[in-house]
């Protein structure tokens, strides 16, 4: 029984690495079986399909995220502190499970479209709601700005956090902890210095008002 479980775990870890590196469509059951050292038919004794393997990898991954997020929500901290902890927790999980994180980010469209991943879709919706609830709590207590919709702020900070796996190297000189501090600081405090914040916001308001009706070009827009 232990040998069967070990083989199952080997299939999961091997498939996760291959799918993260090559992509879901380019990774075949035969390639996974060859890498594990079994025949394709033997692999089907453990999983009915390639999608079933990916589903288990991501279910474990999302369960871990939800469990760690629940700890953050139960901490009793302020919304700003909880937001920081969500950032730190997310980056730590990305560091601990890089392959599952890469699959989840890179195969998002496939995961949304395929009915076999409804459990993944449901878990993703709950994770999103965790972030939005913290953001809305911050707006309610006055610590976050009310003029930016919560879902917009969520999408921006979500991509800043999770897509950092494409460039951040946890074993490099720029640590995961420093990245978490910088992401939180940028989103909560901004990048401009105190003396330049007001002029920049005023310029931004002026830019929004200068949209040309003919071609939709915004004056001073950056690419």
Image (cartoon, rainbow, N blue to C red):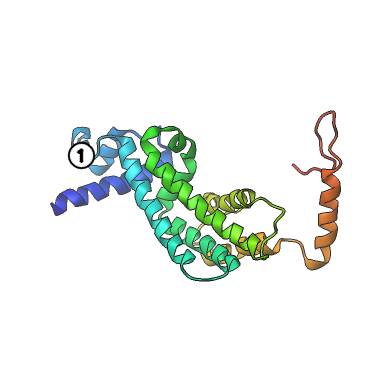
Q: Is residue 138 above or below residue 110?
A: below
Q: Is residue 161 above or below residue 143?
A: above
Closest to the observer: 42 or 56? 56
Q: Is residue 26 visible?
A: no
Closest to the observer: 112 or 9? 112
User: Residue at the spot x=36%, y=45% of the render?
Assistant: 16
Q: Position of residue 43 (x, y in %)?
A: 22, 38
Q: Position of residue 97 (x, y in %)?
A: 40, 55
Closest to the observer: 73 or 162? 73
Side of 69 where 44 appears, left or right: left
User: Residue at the spot x=31%, y=36% of the render?
Assistant: 50
- The number of numbered discs placed on residues in the rendered structure image is 1
Q: Is residue 142 above or below residue 161?
A: below
Q: Position of residue 116 (x, y in %)?
A: 36, 35
* Quadrant into which the C terminus falls: top right
Q: Position of residue 46 (x, y in %)?
A: 21, 41
Q: Is residue 87 above or below residue 215?
A: below
Tell me where residue 139 sits by quadrant: bottom right
Q: Residue furthest top?
A: 214
Side of 49 where 93 appears, left or right: right
Side of 115 where 188 appears, left or right: right
Q: Which residue is mark 1?
A: 38
Q: Secondary structure at mark 1?
A: loop
User: Residue at the spot x=58%, y=65% of the render?
Assistant: 79
Q: Is residue 144 visible?
A: yes
Tell me where residue 33 sits by quadrant: top left
Q: Residue furthest left?
A: 1
């Amino acid at each position: 029984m232990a040998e069967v479980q070990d083989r199952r775990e080997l299939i999961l870890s091997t498939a996760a690495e291959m799918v993260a590196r090559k992509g879901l469509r380019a990774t075949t059951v035969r390639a996974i079986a060859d890498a594990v050292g079994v025949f394709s038919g033997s692999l089907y004794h453990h999983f009915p399909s390639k999608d079933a393997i990916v589903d288990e990898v991501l279910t474990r991954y999302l369960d871990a995220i939800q469990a760690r997020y629940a700890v953050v929500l139960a901490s009793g901290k302020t919304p700003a502190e909880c937001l920081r902890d969500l950032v730190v927790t997310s980056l730590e999980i990305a560091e601990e499970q890089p392959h599952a994180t890469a699959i989840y980010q890179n195969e998002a469209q496939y995961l949304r479209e395929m009915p076999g991943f409804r459990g993944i879709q449901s878990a993703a919706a709950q994770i999103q709601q965790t972030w939005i609830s913290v953001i809305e709590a911050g707006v309610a207590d006055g610590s976050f700005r009310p003029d930016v919709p919560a879902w917009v702020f969520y999408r921006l900070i979500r991509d800043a956090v999770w897509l950092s796996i494409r460039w951040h190297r946890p074993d490099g000189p720029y640590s995961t902890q420093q990245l978490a501090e910088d992401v939180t600081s940028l989103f909560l405090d901004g990048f401009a210095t105190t003396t330049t914040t007001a002029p920049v916001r005023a310029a931004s308001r002026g830019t929004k008002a200068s949209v040309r009706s003919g071609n939709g070009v915004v004056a001073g827009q950056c690419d």
